[in-house]
Image (tube, rainbow, N blue to C red):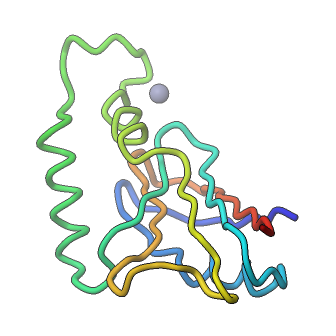
Amino acid sequence: MVYEYTLKTQKQNFYNITSFVKNAVKQSGIINGIAVVYCPHTTAGITINENADPDVVTDLLYALDVTYPDRPEFRHAEGNTTAHIKSSVMGASQTVIIDNGRLLLGTWQGIYFTEFDGPRIRKYYVKVIEG
Ligand code: ZN
């Protein structure tokens, strides 16, 4: 079973989707296994990072902008190459272990959907696998 979620995004941001992933695991009834969180977009991604201090997300967005600025040498006609780069840096998915019905995340870890070319209506999937 695949759980599908939609998300309305801003131009660029990180969205904490941990509670939705937890709900998918609960709904699946699977006690031990893995949850795969997958983003089917080329200018967005999924990552795991700090969930406590919102300044971490602010700093990550700033650092990504500084590290991957727009360049006149970029050829992609759509003009959003930096968003494609950031998407690949984040990756399209994360896999989290489910142990005894709960996600084995660290205390300070949250699962984020990352937008780099919004605003858009985005989708992500959660697949829960027993094992
Ligand atoms: Zn593009």
Q: Nearer the viewer, residue 11 or 31?
A: 31
Is 94 left, or right, of 63 in this rendering? right
Picture coordinates of residue 113 (x, y %)?
Answer: 48, 62
The outermost residue toward the right is 1
Picture coordinates of residue 38 (x, y %)?
Answer: 62, 53
Q: Quadrant of residue 87?
A: top left
Q: Quadrant of residue 65?
A: top left
Is 76 left, or right, of 63 in this rendering? right
Residue at 21%, 29% (x, y): give it.
Answer: 70
Question: Does 41 appear above or below 33?
Answer: above
Which quarter of the figure is the N terminus placed in?
bottom right
Is 10 left, or right, of 124 in this rendering? left
Q: Nearer the viewer, residue 113 or 21?
A: 21
Q: How many marks?
A: 0
Which quarter of the figure is the C terminus placed in?
bottom right
Question: Does 13 appear above or below 75?
Answer: below
Residue at 40%, 16% (x, y): give it.
Answer: 76
Residue at 19%, 15% (x, y): give it.
Answer: 72
Q: Nearer the viewer, residue 74 or 19?
A: 19
Question: Does 10 appear above or below 25?
Answer: above
